[in-house]
Amino acid sequence: MPDLLGIELEVIEILLVVSLVAVAARRFRMPYTVALVLAGLALTVQNELQLELTPELVLAFFLPPLLFEAAFHIQFRELREDLGPILALAVPGVVLSAALTGGLLYAAGILALPQALLFGALISATDPVSVVATFKAMGAPRRLTTLLEGESLFNDGTAIVAFQIVLVLALAGTLDPLKGLVDFFRVSLGGLAIGAVLGYAIAQLIARIDDYLIEITLTTILAFGSYLIAERFHVSGVLAVVMAGLINGNLGPRGMSPTTRIVLFNFWEYIAFLSNSFIFLLIGMNVNLDELGLYLQPVLIAVAAVLVTRAIVTYTLGSIVRIFKRNLPFSYLHVLVWGGLRGAVSLALVLSLPFTLAERRQLLAMAFGVVLFTLLAQATSIPLLLRRLGFAGNQRTPAEYERLQGELLAIRAARRHIDHLHREGALIPHAWETVEQELDQRERQALGAIDELLAKHPELQEEIISLARKEALRAQRAALASLAREGLLSEETLSELQAEVDSALQETETDHATEKQAIVEERAPITS
């Protein structure tokens, strides 16, 4: 019991640190994850908190909810439009990155070839959390976020499978290429198949339930259960979670009421926030500065090798993809190169190395060094790159609109409350008339400001109209399901009407995507 209470106290202390860091990061306008790493480093120096970052903690506890939440929000349409570049970077890109990074380290005389390839495999998984948060804050194109998140979702699984195969080479000194290739496809496709089956099954179950507490519970079971079941069958748990999140995120919400969707999205946003917070704080807390100093030269060479490899692989594969997909701006590749941060997966893999491996200490120092550089240097300079490329021109517009919309809704809520008090006789007429006039004036001012803002930004107005259409169609679908449950619609009629609504919803999403993509491509500089 004392140990349990001690762990509980440490968790509470970390949550307090997380909250304070979040407030400070927003106040000083710096990436939240970078602030967490710095806070973790400060805690390590002061030796106030001690919580070990273990591979089991990352891979089995923190990673599944992060992967599930990210995959849950990616629409098939967005993924399908850029599936070529995403898979190119996530599969052959990872293999090439591992090979090139390992080759450069071997050529520099830092490591023997098996250990160099092992480091290349474990460091090839990207972590877009810091970059995506910056994208959202600066109003970067949604397509950039999809490319970076999609690559990370799939290359995590590829990197883990590649790492496990190369680890055999590093330990045993031999590797059967054919067996390695077969194992790669077996583990990868097996994980995707398990995730697809479980994701579809839970989506069908959710469609028959109208209780947000149960639906949240089912998605939680899916996120962790898909990982555990896949690992039990010795296939990729990471890819299982990704596929489960994609399937469930695209099929599950269709039968949900608007209230359930809001609650579900908020729940997973909070879980992802907690997981990211713990991971990046623990990264800072587990950095051994003495080890980094001891292996400073290998660390610096590893950082250079990772940067060079990322540039070579991204520009090469990106250029090949652009031959077949000409609407992919070359300027996007600049962001993908510098946005290829490393994070939790790389550290989990290096921490999982057996202690019998002679170079384990050096590999640990190199991995932590690369992760720290990408977080402290690349993540903090992404805003400058976005501004230089012209991807941050309208970053204030969504926030300004949200503020005005929130103000308008608050005014109207106040008016309803005042009207209710007046009708009940709890407010004298003179007081009601005075406050009513004040609220009228404030509402006119808010409406005028919104009209002015929308006139300056027509694309924002189109996006709001599109969202309104989709919400109206989703409300219609929820109403049809409710009528069927009450016995007012037969199953056959329900299916026909829902199919019509789904068709209209798909058409609305396609039209909106086409309009938005046209705006993005018009603004994005395309250089060759």
Image: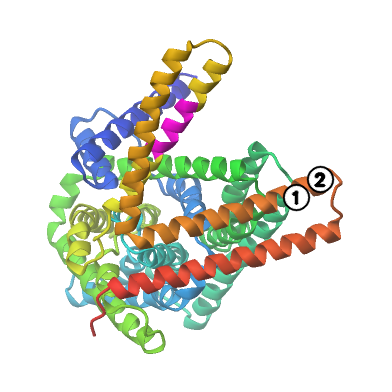
Tell me: 76 left or right of 520: right
Looking at the image, residue 361 lies above or below residue 525: above
Residue carrying label 2: 485
- Residue interval drawn in magenta: 406-415
- Judge the density around disc 2: few (<14), some (14-19), many (≥20) Cα neighbours within 10 Å: few
Residue carrying label 1: 481
Name the image quarter holding residue 138: bottom left
Tell me: 238 left or right of 434: right
- Considering depth in this image, is 514 or 158 the residue closer to the camera? 514
Q: Residue at x 61, y 63 (%)?
A: 505
Place of residue 227 in the rendered image (x, y in percent of width and height, measured from the top left):
57, 54
Q: Amino acid at mark 1?
A: Ala
Q: Amino acid at mark 2?
A: Arg
Instruction: Give the SS element for disc 1.
Output: helix
- Considering depth in this image, is 287 or 221 the residue closer to the camera? 221
For the residues bearing labels 1 and 2, Cβ distance under 8 angstroms: yes
- Considering depth in this image, is 6 or 88 the residue closer to the camera? 88
